[in-house]
Image: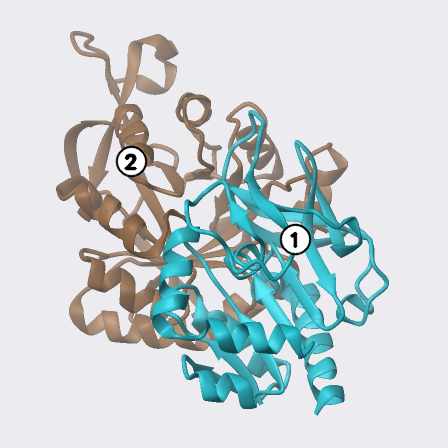
Chain colours: A cyan, B brown
Amino acid sequence: MIALIDYGMGNLGSVEKALVKVGCEVRVTADAGVIREAAGVVLPGVGAFDDCMINLKAAGVIPAIEAAVAADKPFLGICLGLQVLFESSEEGKLPGLGLLPGKVVRFRHDLKVPQIGWNQIAVRQDCPQLRGIADGSWVYFVHSFYPEPADETLTATVTNYGYDFVSAVRRGNLFASQWHPEKSAAVGLHVLENFRHLVEAAQ
Amino acid sequence: MLAKRIIPCLDVTGGRVVKGVKYFDHVDAGDPVEQAANYDRQGADELVFLDITASLDHRDIMLDIVRRVAEQVFIPFTVGGGVRTVEDIREILKAGADKTSIMTAAIQDPDLVNKGAERFGSQCIVVAIDAKRVPREGRDDSNLGYAPDEEIEWVVYTHGGHRPTTVDALAWAAEAEERGAGELLVTSMDADGTKAGYDIELLRRISERASIPVIASGGAGTVDHLYEALTLGKADAVLAASIFHFGETTVQTVKQELAARGITMRL
């Protein structure tokens, strides 16, 4: 079973439907016990950084998230669900979860921000989460901020918008993307299917 | 590089897709869920559903369509038509849409844009602007298609293009952005359904001022028209209905032709 964390923010519906489409057994939950029992954890998110931290705290799910990451359980962060894994963000005043080293920064250029639409990923890690995903695949973005990992080896994909930025990170069974796999057509469903395989292997 | 988007638009009434000319005569163009899946297969970058009746009984039919589309289409989609309250936005997003477009209610109650953006995020609030050319004040010439650009302006229409307002479309576009709109869907009422091309001047003037994406709508008849909207009109995305609905061309063909002409496309 995969726990899809519901903390009152984000496009839970589309993430859930996409996971179900690729054959996952999903439970939408804010119950720390369910998250601890789950074989895989998905942290979605759309909105503002501080609101996300406040809601995660209020939902009481932070210790369960920390435990899942510490145990290297298959973990998928999406968009804001990637950003809060880092130590801080230029968007907010509150600290992030600090499970990954580095910070989240805003685009520094004259192009339109947020970046909305389809852009390409350069694949920088040969990892199970990106198995079968070709270099240059198109994925869907909606964001103004992106991660700057302090550890370069975390970088899983890079995207160009004005300049190159890190668009996904990975460490062991943890994978988090700034793009939305649930809205990235066949490429996105393939990434979710890779995640399902990881969860099944871990069970 | 960020791709320009091709967005088929499905006008829905009574559970069917229809296409009208200049907002009035409607022709049946198929089942919405089936059409959505077709467009996804053809490589559409996004979809827009407009509930053009939007009465209360139609609302439930529309929400049911949204739910069914969300189960099988994994690209972003927007639902609009008759969205009046924060609760309407919530229902549409909950049914599985990624964005809502607001038109009449945003003019009548501009705070709805702020409230929607604060509650659900700017990324899911698309402000739709129906604009129509009028002579600049003091000018007496009804032949606007031929008037020099500096002698025209655009007013906003509401109620699906039936009711004129005194609101200036360019000023409203800027205000909507300031209030938290994530994107602007700009439809030329003069061009809509004519297949004679977008109102490029309208698009260019709004795009040059906006720092959020502008989606061009109304008037697409050929690939040239889409090309003009994305280059001369500086739009980030183009919405089109008639050229796709009746099988004249496919999204895939259009994207290949635009890519061959140097536009960044997801292929």
In this rendering, is residue A108 above or below A200?
above
Mark 1 — residue? A101
Q: Label 1: how many residues lie within 10 Å, few (<14), some (14-19) or many (20+)?
A: some
Q: Which mark is residue B176?
A: 2
Q: Is residue B47 left or right of A119 when viewed as pictured?
A: left
Secondary structure, mark 2, is helix
Which image quarter is the N terminus of chain B in? Answer: top right
Picture coordinates of residue A40, whole percent (x, y): 62, 81
Q: Are marks 2 and 1 on the same chain?
A: no
- Looking at this view, is B154 or A201 the one in front? A201
Q: Label 2: how many residues lie within 10 Å, few (<14), some (14-19) or many (20+)?
A: many
Label 1: chain? A
Secondary structure, mark 1, is loop
- Looking at this view, is B66 or A169 the one in front? A169
**Which residue does the image show at 29% across and 35% down from the upper left?**
B176
Q: Looking at numbered disc 2 in the image, what kind of residue is underneath it? A: Ala
Say which of marks 2 and 1 sits in front: 1
C-alpha span from label 2 to label 1? 38 Å
Picture coordinates of residue A203, whole percent (x, y): 70, 92
Picture coordinates of residue B83, whole percent (x, y): 23, 57
